């Protein structure tokens, strides 16, 4: 009985192996086509840019920078320290008094790093 299933199993195994080989060839051809389009300038070097972005620490720096006022605010609420709350209020007051171009630059950089839509903020501000 088991011997009668052997040709079916071998045929299925060969089919799976052939499909995996075809998949490797197709992926290789797709990567080659993508590289040719990048060389011709038809598409941007997105893959290279993504790889470079994964190697930096700027995302972590911006995350700490953005999170710091919130962390201080949480600490001031739970520690009942009015000095910290006052300093946070001063910080946001000073930040809102910065030139509009600097606020836009800061929000734009954060948006570019995290892929957020910072431009929506400016459209609502009008």
Image (cartoon, rainbow, N blue to C red):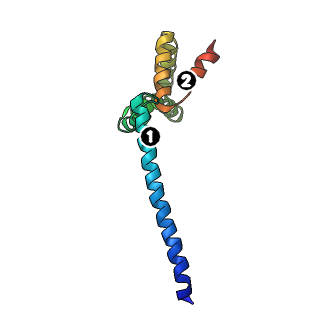
Which residue matches tag 1?
Answer: 33
Q: Is residue 59 visible?
A: no
Q: Position of residue 99 (x, y in %)?
A: 48, 9
**Residue at image point 44% right, 40% down:** 33
Residue depicted at 46% across the width and 13% down the height: 102
**64 left or right of 15?**
left
Q: Quadrant of the C terminus?
A: top right
Is 84 or 94 nearer to us in this picture?
94
Q: Residue at x 41, y 42 (%)?
A: 32
**Looking at the rendering, which quadrant does residue 117 occupy?**
top right
Image depth: mark 1 or mark 2 in front: 1
Mark 1 Cα within 10 Å, few/some/many (few <14, many 20+)? few
Percent from the top left, x then y, of residue 47?
42, 37
**Residue 57, horizontal then vertical, whole percent:** 36, 35
Q: In this rendering, is residue 98 above or below 28?
A: above
Foreground residue among 107 and 2: 2
Label 2 secondary element: loop
Helix, strand, or loop for circle 1?
Answer: helix
Residue 73 in sight: yes
Q: Is residue 119 above or below residue 77?
A: above
As drawn, 96 above or below 49: above
Q: Which residue is mark 2?
A: 118
Q: What crowding class fits label 2: few (fewer than 14 Cα within 10 Å), some (14-19), or many (20 or more)?
A: some
Quarter holding the N terminus is bottom right
**Residues at marks 1 and 2, CA–CA distance in whole angstroms:** 34 Å
């Amino acid at each position: 009985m088991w011997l009668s299933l052997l040709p079916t199993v071998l045929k299925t195994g060969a089919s799976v192996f052939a499909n995996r080989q075809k998949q490797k060839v197709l992926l290789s051809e797709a990567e080659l086509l993508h590289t040719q389009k990048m060389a011709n300038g038809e598409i941007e070097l997105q893959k290279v840019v993504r790889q470079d972005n994964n190697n930096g620490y700027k995302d972590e720096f911006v995350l700490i920078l953005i999170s710091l006022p919130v962390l201080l605010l949480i600490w001031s609420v739970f520690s009942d320290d009015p000095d910290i709350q006052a300093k946070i209020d001063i910080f946001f007051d000073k930040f809102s008094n910065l030139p509009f171009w600097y606020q836009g630059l800061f929000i734009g950089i954060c948006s570019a790093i995290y892929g957020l839509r910072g431009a929506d903020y400016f459209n609502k501000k009008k």
